[in-house]
Structure formats: C-alpha cells, structure tokens
Amino acid sequence: MKVVDVHSFTSVKILKNGIIGIEIFLPNAPPLIVIRGRKGFIMCGYLNINVANKLGLIAARVAGVRSVEEMLNKEVAEVTTKAKEIGIKEGMKVKDVLELI
C-alpha cells in the first residue's frame, strides 16, 4: 500500500464539538461533501438517502452545494427515519442540525 498526500484531493474542516466537514474534490465535477457528527451525518446529493435509511443511520441529505460552508446554510431536503426520531426535519438549516448529530 502506498500512502499519498491527499491535500489536493480532500479538505477536512473542524466545525465544532467533534463535528467535521469533508470535501472530496472530483475531476470535472462538484466536490462530494459530508458533514460527520458523533451520531450521524449530513450528505450532499451524490449519496443515497434510501441506503442510509435501510442501514438504520441518522442521516440527512442536502442538494446543490459546492462547499462545507455552503452546506451549513442550506436546508435539509431529505432525512432518514432515525434522523426524524432525534428531531431532524426536512427544511431545517444544516447549521441547526449540527447539535443533533
């Protein structure tokens, strides 16, 4: 296995309370973006909310973002059943969801 310097491929941002934002830069496409908390995560439109739901995960999906900062100000488009159980709702601002994940 070869270890590669990933600075040109990814960006990891420390948000607060152990929450991190990850941007994975893709060729000729917007980045893949995930905000990971201790209990769950918020994903960009590339990822499938139905799979997260089947796996019983606490997850929310946001569409149309190109950075972690942009994601923080967007509204949640879809949530899993487990996310609903802890109070995450469609239409919430992502920055308000951080305390729940």
Image (cartoon, helix red, strand yellow):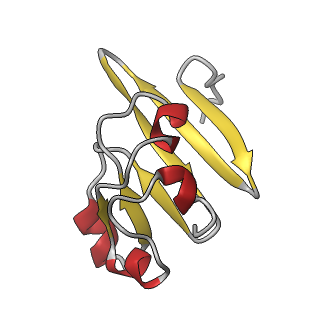
Q: In which quarter of the image is the N terminus?
A: top right
- Relative to 37, 32 lies left or right: left
Q: Which residue reaches farthest left?
A: 50
Q: Quadrant of residue 31?
A: top left
- Relative to 8, 92 lies left or right: left
- Relative to 99, 79 lies left or right: left
Query: Measured from the top left, where is residue 99 in percent x and y?
Result: 63, 65
Closest to the observer, 58 or 1:
58
Query: Measured from the top left, where is residue 82 in percent x and y?
Result: 40, 80
Looking at the image, is 43 positioned above or below residue 9?
A: below
Query: Measured from the top left, where is residue 100 in percent x and y?
Result: 58, 70
Looking at the image, is 59 positioned above or below residue 30?
A: below
Closest to the observer, 88 or 7:
88
Query: Measured from the top left, where is residue 57 in percent x and y?
Result: 42, 74
Identify the residue at image location x=37%, y=69%: 89
Identify the residue at image location x=29%, y=42%: 63
Identify the residue at image location x=50%, y=60%: 41
